[in-house]
Each structure stands twice: as C-alpha cells, then as structure tokens.
Image (cartoon, coloured by chain):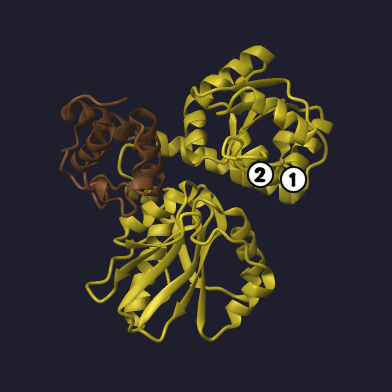
Amino acid sequence: MGGGTAPGVIGELRDILARATGREELREVDERQPLFGPGVGLDSLTGTLLLREVHRRFGVDVAGEDLNLDSLASLATLAAFIGERSA
Amino acid sequence: MVKCVIWDLDNTLLDGVYLESTSRPPGADPDMVSAAAQLRDRGILHAIASRNPPEAAQYAARVTGLEFAAAECGWGRKSDAIRQIIADLDIAPDAIAFVDDDLYERAEVSFAVPEALVLSPEDMSDAVGWPEFSPGVVTAEARRRGEMYAERRRRLAEARAFAGSRDEFLRYSETEVTIAPATAADVPRLHELSVRTHQFNSSGEAIAEPALRALVGSPSHRVTVVRLRDKFGDDGLVGGCVVEAGPDGAWTVTLLMMSCRAMGRGVMEALLAWLARSARRGGAAALAVPCRVSPRNMPLQLALAASGFRAAEGGSPDEPAAVFSRPVTGPPPGLPGWVSAPEA
C-alpha cells in the first residue's frame, strides 16, 4: 500500500505535516529542513498527529520500529524510512 | 445541553482492547460505565463509534449493561461515524459529546465536527457534573471544570486561526510554566496524575499517596511539579517527575508524567530542558529516563527524541522497556522565557 515514487511521498508528507501543525506554509518546507527544533518545531502533539496519519496512509508504524525516531530528522529521512518498509 | 454521548470502545468504555484479547475480551471500564449510567438516568442517550467489528457493540452492551441508541463499528474515519449517528438519531451536532482515549481520533473529530464536545476518558469522569450534562443543580467545582473545558475550546479555536509558529502562539497566549519542588499538598494531584495519565507517563503504574508522600520527604529523591496557565485559563498542576541522583554521577528520572491537557504547549520540553540543566548543575554526567514504551505513550517518545535523548533497549518482549538518556556535560539547553523555575 502507499508506495509511489519518493517525490510523491514527500509531497504527501508535506501535506500531512501542514495539516498536523495547522501551518499552511509548511507545504513549501525543504525536505532536508530538520523537523525538531526551530523552524518546523515538531513537538509531541504535532508529531503524534503526523505519525498516526503516516501509519494510516502508508501502513508504517514509525514509532514502533524506530525507537529513537531518527527517521524524523527531516521529511527526506522519513520518506526514505517509509520507502524501505512499504516497498 | 448534550443529548447523546458517543463512545469509543477500546481503552475507553472497555478496560482494554477488544481485538487484542486472545481468549477473553476486556471487561467494562468501571469509571466510564458509572459516568454513563448517571447520564442515562438524566435522559441522555448513548451511542458507539469504534474501530472494531460490529459484534463488539453487542459485546459492549452486554458487559456495560447500557443500551445504545446507535452503533457505528468499522474502519473508516471517526468523524464519518459520528456524522452518521447524528443523522440517524436526528440530533444537532452541538448536542453530542464524543469520548475517546486516542488523541488522534479526538483531534480528527474536533476538526471535522467542531460543534461537538470532544472529551478524553479523564475529562469524562469530571464531566458528569458539568452544566453541559446537568439539567439540575451544578456545584461550583463542577462549574469550574466546565469553564476549564470552555477555556480550552477558545484556546484551540484561536490556535487554529493563528498564523505563526507554536512558540509564537505560546507567547501570544501569555503562557506561564512554573517548575517547583513538590510539597505534601501536591501529593493528591500527583497520585491522580499517576492514575490518569497514559500518553505522557514513563512508568504506566499508579503510585499510591503514601508512597508519593515518602518520596516528597526523601532526601535521596527530588520530586518536582509543573504548573501551567495562560490568558485563556489556569490549568493548575499538570505534571510531575521524580529524580534519583545515583552514586555513579547519573541522574535517573524514575517517574515522568504529564496531563494530556498540557500537550502541545511546550510543558514537557520545558521540564526536560530544566532537568538537563539541573543535572548538569548538580554535577551529573548524564540524565536517564527509563520508559515503558507502548503505542499509547508515543507522545512521550516524541518529546524525548525532540529533546535530544537516545534510547537503549531493555526489558522483555512482553514489557518493552527502554532507557532514554542524554549527556548533560555540554552546553545546557535553553529555557524559554515563559518558564519560571529554580535556578538551574
């Protein structure tokens, strides 16, 4: 399920991120921009909403498979993580 | 006035997950059933919206002894199930309450059906006394809790319309996070948090009041509490932690918990940053947070990852545990301006 090319996945992730944070401008966010820390400022609430929507759309349980959540470094690392698991 | 309460089943009306039970499905949650029975006696209807097969609704009716006016069981969106129930029962959207333990489901429903009263099970145990559910006399305490919920809805509505980052919104809302040593007077609320918090709880175990009182008085432990308020309202004591300073120079946070009311408001991040600063000041080399990891406390896992903690796995397959830790010898993490705390 999910799948598609990486650029397609990143587009969908931008969409999910914008809705989880309620910030439309994140639809334009650079795929290498760090998700934690200033800028995007992903936190426990918005991160939970993001990961639950990722699970729903791509069938990948990121939090369960990646204890340290290194895959949340950026949208690019998250797309790569999803790509490896939903292939 | 609420005319119908729509219930989630897993970990809400039921004391566990229906489909995860191999031999015997979970029983009814006594707190939720008692709240539901009181509401039924006031003429309020009940309905079910659950991600389960249809037989789960019949099962819930049997173990709770409640009657359900409608049941939507399936794997679609909760907001669609709720709209279906609203249509079937011919009830206005502002006359329903929706109770779900899952943060994601609550967010989805409050976004799609903004008129509905959306509650966690923790809210629901209080809500029985709120004016929204009470045709008759309402106590001052119950009215206050009902007001707190109204404050939260105003905050949520403004946050949604706010153009800017979360930190900008926290400043705009005049957020004040106060970190302080716990006193004996905080023990009942700390106990309540240990029972009721799941999404932000490192141990997942309730702690009795005498044990907490002993920790507050113990010279080898530090018990800390966190309070939260902003221009929308005062949430009071929303979180706490217990720290043990070990002989090996490592500080261990043996308990870390926070109410889901404080989520998304920078409180856990502030507490973790303050703990790292305090550990550094206390001469520790590292700060460790042993944590029972489950899908329910994913918010805690996120907060730890966002605050620079790394996990080492431990425990058994039945009880997955991990120790999250971070060094504290480098430059200390900053504390935002809205946090007041003892020097660290």
Q: Residue B142 location, x and y as percent?
A: 72, 47
| Chain of residue at mark 1 | B
Q: Nearer the viewer, mark 2 or mark 1?
A: 2
Element type where label 1 sits in the image: helix
Task: Report the Cα–Cα distance between label 2 and label 1.
Answer: 8 Å
Left/right of residue B79 with respect to residue A65 in the rendered view: right
User: Which quarter of the figure has residue B90?
Assistant: top right
Q: Residue B175 location, x and y as percent?
A: 43, 54
Q: Residue B163 location, x and y as percent?
A: 32, 37
* Viewer-nearest residue: B160 or B202: B202
Kindly identify the residue that appears in the image at 67 percent across and 40 percent down.
B24
Q: Which mark is residue A26?
A: none
Mark 2 neighbour density, 10 Å: few (under 14) some (14–19) many (20 or more): some
Kindly identify the residue that appears in the image at 75 percent across and 49 percent down.
B140
Left/right of residue B63 with respect to residue B251 in the rendered view: right
Kindly identify the residue that appears in the image at 57 percent across and 59 percent down.
B236
Badge 2 is on which residue? Answer: B15
**Mark 2 or mark 1: which comes first in sequence?**
2
From what the image shows, is residue B46 above or below residue B257? Answer: above
- In this view, the residue farthest toward the front is B23
Q: Are marks 2 and 1 in contact (CB under 8 Å)?
A: yes
Tell me the amino acid under the disc marked 2. Answer: Asp
| Chain of residue at mark 2 | B
The chain letter corresponding to brown is A
Badge 1 is on which residue? Answer: B30
Tell me the amino acid under the disc marked 1. Answer: Pro
Element type where label 2 sits in the image: loop
* Viewer-nearest residue: B203 or B6: B203
* Viewer-nearest residue: A46 or B67: B67
For the C terminus of chain B, give its image quadrant.
bottom left
The chain letter corresponding to yellow is B
